[in-house]
Amino acid sequence: MIYDHPLLERLYRTSPPFVQNLFVTGYGALKVFERWTPTFRDYLRELTETQWWSSGQLTELQNQRLRRLIRHCYDTVPYYRRIFDERGLTPNDITVAEDLYKLPSLTKEDVRRYQEALRSRSVPDRATTTGRTGGTSGIPLYFTLDRARVTFDHALVYRHWSWAGWTPRDWVVVLRGVTLVDANYRGSKFWRKDYADRRIYLSAFHMAQDTMSRYVEALNSWRLQFIAAYPSSLFALARHLEQHNTSVPVAAVFTGSESITPTERSTIERRSRAETLDSLVRRTVHVDAASRSWVRSLVVVTTSSSRRTVA
């Protein structure tokens, strides 16, 4: 996003909210354009096809790509070449997911300390971009991503959301660790809008007892169908709704990146739908077979009527 380039981030941080919306919309326009690229379409085609495969077929596909990834790391990533050599391992020692215990876990401190050594020597700079964590648990972590992996993530989200009836024409409220609203912001609009990709990014960092009612007022005025959020952030909002005996009905809620407790889930479900409607809860696990990252998510689907109005 705006973190890809230091100058771009500085310009964004010093701009008024309406100009920041233009920045965010520009990023969204790139994502919309990406959906028309052969790379995105190939990924989406593969995901659409393989979602119907048996667990055995999926396991074999994952292990095939794991072996390819292990060979790639051994041959081109200095950090992992050292790890393999120190442990007397070769790529042939890791052929299935159950073998991954032979490698140490990669911590945030490892990424900060060995950032250059973790970069593949076979991936040119032009094929990379900058990623970062939201910083909700401390200092944000910056790291390098290859652009194809980012495109694959977007295809995963597209497929995931479409299971709940989402289409690119629908607006989505995003309540995650995205710091688009400055920590020192003193206004009343704790969100930024992407008019191209139809996202409204709420700031999780400005949620407090004295501001929560503003969030609820905005959500009800937008009348959107979908929310994508960290469970902890959405639970904080749901608790506020519970305390005031009200709700924000939507068609579907997508949570990820954190585990969700039974209490969080029940409270979110209760306060994110019309009280007379039952909800269908589907737990899903997505496997990014190319990078072996597991994304656990919760889909809460209701039968509430269409809510497409955006102010």
Image (cartoon, grey):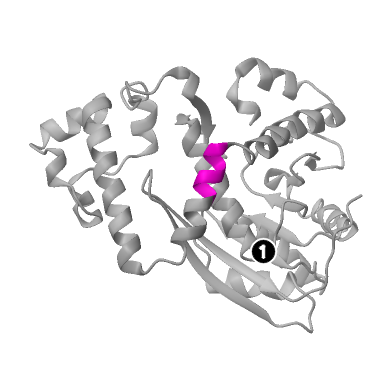
Relative to 72, 201 lies left or right: right
Q: 191 or 41: nearer the eye?
A: 41
Residue 183 visible, this orientation:
no
Considering only vertical position in the picture, is 42 above or below 24? Answer: below
Considering only vertical position in the picture, is 200 above or below 125? Answer: below
The structure residue drawn at horizontal position 66% and vertical position 37%, both measured from the top left corner, is 31
Callout 1: SS: strand
- Whether residue 61 is in magenta: the answer is no
Name the residue beneath numbered marker 1.
253
Considering only vertical position in the picture, is 253 above or below 290? Answer: below
Residue that extends furthest to the left in the rendered view of this protein: 88
> In the image, what residue type sits under mark 1?
Val
| Quadrant of residue 91 within the rendered picture | top left
Q: Position of residue 242 (x, y in %)?
A: 75, 72
The structure residue drawn at horizontal position 87% and vertical position 31%, both measured from the top left corner, is 18
At label 1, counting other C-alpha atoms closer than 10 Å, the crowd grade (few under 14, some 14-19, many 20 or more) is many
The structure residue drawn at horizontal position 53% and vertical position 34%, both measured from the top left corner, is 132
The structure residue drawn at horizontal position 49% and vertical position 19%, both measured from the top left corner, is 126
Q: Position of residue 252 (x, y in %)?
A: 69, 66
Magenta span? 38-44
Q: Position of residue 37 (x, y in %)?
A: 60, 36
Q: Position of residue 24 (x, y in %)?
A: 74, 33
Relative to 252, 82 lies left or right: left
Q: 198 or 134: nearer the eye?
A: 198
* Callout count: 1
Q: 223 or 49: nearer the eye?
A: 49
Relative to 60, 157 lies left or right: right
Residue 50 visible, this orientation:
yes
